[in-house]
Image (cartoon, rainbow, N blue to C red):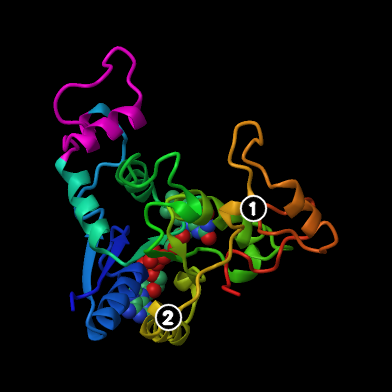
Amino acid sequence: MAQKTALIIYAHQNPASFNAAARDVAVQALTKQGYKVLVSDLYAMNFKASATAEDVKGDLKNPEHFIYNDEMMVAWQNGRLSDDIAEEHRKLEQAELVIFQFPLYWFSVPAILKGWIDRVLTQGFAFTMQKLYDNGVFKNKKAMLSFTTGAIESMFKPDGIHGDINIVLWPLQNGVLRFCGFQVLAPQIFWCPAHSPPEVRSAMLEAWQERMNGIFAEKPLSYAPTKYFDLSFQGGFCLRPEIKEEYASESHGITTAQHLGKLLPPDNQTKAK
Ligand code: FAD
């Protein structure tokens, strides 16, 4: 049987950081289970963050009016993507599990990782207008965010000063991962390692190692199935009337963002149900 593969997209500058420790724990735990583990160490690779015409080898389709997604799709079809993107595509193709390991920057990923998302999740390769969400290109793969924060957990509670972490996570988990079809596993959040005592930091890494041991059996987070939506321009790609009716008497919305003006389903982006 072919060896299974995991891919870690790692974005931290410092090999002595807590993020590096979290990466190492994942590499060791997965390797021990017999997985081949690939790591893209974005800062060490000096990974280019900006999406530009240099990502295409050879002539552009329309040099007078450059449209990144269009040009990238043609370049992908013709095998003319820049070498760094093509290499990441090869890694992604092999991987059953993709872990994004990073420190939270401005409620999101560091720019270098956003660049990886912009450039590597190329139209055609990672999504098409016909292959999205449930029908997405990567529907047989799992992906998860694993990140550290500067904030303590209570700051990201629904009554905390930063607001509900479930809302913060929606754009990355739904807008990027699930959009491309990934089954999204619950995020691993390391709250404020810089101001935690050493024993708390060690306990966080032990819990991460423990989680890694069962990671491939985990249930993904729940989202509204694509069939709930009328996927036509006439229907506006909105929830079908019968689904709205079905949820009319519910106290909670369907997901964090498809909340229908109701209470948000608790922990929708942080815990699998
Ligand atoms: P480090 O400082 O590297 O590590 C923390 C501690 O863990 C250190 O004492 C280190 O020695 C120790 N450590 C390392 N290895 C181990 C080990 N094996 N075992 C035990 N301990 C170990 N935070 C937010 O909450 N929200 C934001 O929106 C946000 N935006 C930011 C934007 C920018 C531009 C920047 C620079 C920071 C931002 N932050 C934000 C803060 C940032 O998320 C944290 O600084 C970061 O997550 C801390 O993780 P680290 O790996 O860098 O920690």
Q: Which is in the foreground here, disc 1 or disc 2?
A: 1
In depth, the one of 192 and 142 nearer the eye is 142
Give whichever of 200, 143 is nearer the camera.
143
Q: Is residue 94 left or right of residue 231?
A: left
Segment tinted magenta in the rendering: 54-82
With respect to residue 67, does 91 lie above or below? Answer: below
Q: Nearer the viewer, residue 188 or 83?
A: 83
**Front-lying residue, 243 or 79:** 243
Could you tell me how far apart the alpha carbons at marks 1 and 2 are, in whole angstroms? Answer: 26 Å
Verify whether residue 58 appears in magenta: yes
Which picture quadrant has residue 181?
bottom left
Q: Pointer 2: residues within 10 angstroms few (<14), some, or many (20+)?
A: few
Q: Which residue is mark 2?
A: 217
Circle 2: element type: helix
> Which residue of the protein is positioned furthest toward the right in this rendering?
249
Residue that label 1 marks: 228
